[in-house]
């Protein structure tokens, strides 16, 4: 379950990153588009999981964590994109900050999702397991595409780890 939630957190991060790369968007357009995608994912999960009135309070806590995590990651990526002429050390520090925020967000998701998942019926658990596993594969594919795009941008230098392998 923890691994699935980490993937969910990553997917929310990737949703942020994907829309950040759409550089034709103004910050306000980006924020509105990003918020709509997060809300769409929350609504989709709510419907798929058939959240009962008794589960609404736990669901709302989980959905709020999803929103807050997505907002945090979007803000960090926006700051990262807008930062110009940073030293290599500052770039590594920013990377660490983004990764730490993702890890912290994943833990908050675990903490919020655990009680909700425990309240699920066996049928809801099956739907949740299947939904999150399907989403995990889609996220992995999106991450692969984003990494491919990042590594093959014209004029981009290969990361140090790539250079060491060559």
Image (cartoon, grey):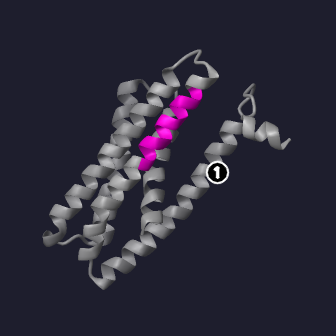
Asked which secondary structure carries label 1, the reply is helix
Looking at the rendered image, the quarter that the N terminus falls into is bottom left
Magenta stretch, overall SS: helix
Say whether residue 96 is left or right of residue 32. right
Residue lying at 81% horizontally and 39% vertically, measured from the top left: 164
Residue 52: name its quadrant: bottom left
Residue 85 image position (x, y, % from top left): 59, 15
Residue lying at 25% horizontally and 68% vertically, measured from the top left: 115
Judged from this view, the residue extending furthest toward the right is 166
Residue lying at 26% horizontally and 72% vertically, measured from the top left: 50
Residue 19 in sight in this render: no
In the image, the segment drawn in magenta is 91-103
Residue 25 image position (x, y, % from top left): 45, 27
Say whether residue 38 is left or right of residue 13. left
Answer whether residue 110 is magenta in the image: no
Residue 138 image position (x, y, % from top left): 54, 60
- The correct choice, above or below, for 127 with respect to 159 in the image is below
- Circle 1 sits on which residue? 144
Other-residue count near label 1 (Cα within 10 Å), few / some / many at <14 / 14–19 / ≥20: few
Say whether residue 166 is left or right of residue 75. right
Residue 27: name its quadrant: top left
Judged from this view, the residue extending furthest toward the bottom is 122
Judged from this view, the residue extending furthest toward the top is 85
Residue 88 in sight in this render: yes
Residue lying at 44% horizontally and 49% vertically, measured from the top left: 103
Q: Nearer the viewer, residue 78 or 21?
A: 78
- The correct choice, above or below, for 100 with respect to 56 in the image is above
- The correct choice, above or below, for 91 with respect to 123 in the image is above
Looking at the rendered image, the quarter that the C terminus falls into is top right
Residue 22 image position (x, y, % from top left): 52, 32
Q: Nearer the viewer, residue 166 or 135?
A: 166
């Amino acid at each position: 379950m923890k691994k699935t939630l980490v993937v969910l957190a990553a997917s929310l991060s990737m949703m942020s990153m994907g829309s950040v790369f759409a550089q034709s968007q103004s910050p306000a357009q980006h924020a509105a588009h990003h918020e709509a995608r997060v809300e769409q994912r929350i609504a989709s999960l709510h419907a798929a999981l058939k959240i009962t009135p008794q589960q609404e309070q736990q669901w709302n806590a989980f959905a709020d964590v999803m929103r807050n995590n997505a907002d945090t990651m979007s803000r960090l990526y926006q700051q990262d994109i807008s930062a110009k002429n940073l030293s290599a050390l500052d770039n590594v520090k920013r990377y660490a900050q983004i990764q730490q925020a993702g890890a912290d967000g994943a833990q908050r998701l675990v903490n919020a999702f655990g009680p909700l998942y425990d309240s699920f019926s066996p049928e809801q658990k099956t739907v949740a397991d299947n939904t999150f596993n399907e989403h995990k594969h889609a996220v992995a594919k999106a991450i692969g595409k984003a990494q491919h795009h990042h590594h093959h941008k014209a004029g981009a230098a290969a990361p140090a780890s790539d250079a060491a392998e060559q």
